[in-house]
Image (tube, helix red, strand yellow):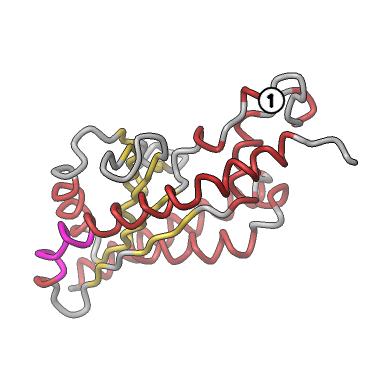
Amino acid sequence: MPERTIEDSLREEYFDLLPEIRRVLWQLEAVIRYHTLTILHALKKPEQLIVKSHVKDCESAIETLGRISKGEGRRFDPDRPDDYSILQLPDLAGVRVPVFPNRRMDEVDDLLRTPFPDWNAKPVKDDSGSVLARKYFGFCSDASDRVCGEYQIVPMLLGLFWEVEHSAMYKFRAVANSKEMRNRRAGVESALAEFEKGVERFL
């Protein structure tokens, strides 16, 4: 029989945790939808606010854990199996809130700090240090005190671009992380931000 690997143990852990991950996602999504209702009802054409939720899939979770935990040779250390746990990931249950126009981001951000006052902020920044999106992670105590959840508030066009880019480049990490692709991605993000600002000024 083949020797059991760390990846095998992580897969088992993931599927043991999956019902708990889903509970966190359901609570997180429900709370965010409830607290953004006032903004949703006040939107004018062509303003938008969307709530999208997702559970990080098993192989993506293992790959992400590998990127942040692997040592020499980018391999899990078989002599230290207890060093690795799916619970180390902050985004097993995630909600993304794309909004348009950008000024709505501050309103959504302020409202969501009420139900999540102690969540840790980890904004997504570009190479110049400008904030592209707001990101927070923490625990939904009624659903789980082990599984961490995450929510993001992002400009609409940038959020759509990230979805397409992630789907297209998921299997090609080496290409996606190359200097050339990072520069191109930064160029697209900058162009989308300027476009949204222009449309917002026009409106």
Q: Which secondary structure dominates the residues rendered in magenta?
A: helix
What is the number of callouts on the image? 1
Q: Which quadrant of the rendered structure holds the C terminus? A: bottom left
Q: Secondary structure at mark 1?
A: helix
Q: Quadrant of residue 145?
A: top left
In the displayed structure, 72 sits above or below 17; it is above
Residue 37 belongs to the span the image colors magenta: yes
Residue at the extreme right: 1
Residue 178 located left or right of residue 161: right
**Pointer 1: residues within 10 angstroms few (<14), some, or many (20+)?**
some
| Residue 116 vs residue 123, the one in the foreground | 116
Q: Residue at x 27, y 35 (%)?
A: 119
Residue at the extreme bottom: 45
Q: Which quadrant of the rendered structure holds the N terminus? A: top right
Q: Which residue is mark 1?
A: 81
Residue at the extreme front: 1
Q: Position of residue 47 (x, y in %)?
A: 21, 73
Query: Magenta stretch?
Result: 33-40
Residue 155 belongs to the span the image colors magenta: no
Q: Residue at x 22, y 67 (%)?
A: 200
Q: Quadrant of residue 37?
A: bottom left
| Residue 27 vs residue 127, the one in the foreground | 27
Q: Position of residue 82 (x, y in %)?
A: 63, 23
At label 1, which amino acid type do we have?
Pro
In the displayed structure, 78 sits above or below 54; it is above
Q: Quadrant of residue 4?
A: top right
Q: Residue at x 66, y 49 (%)?
A: 180
| Residue 168 vs residue 14, the one in the foreground | 14
Q: Residue at x 32, y 41 (%)?
A: 136
| Residue 134 vs residue 70, the one in the foreground | 70
Q: Position of residue 73 (x, y in %)?
A: 80, 28
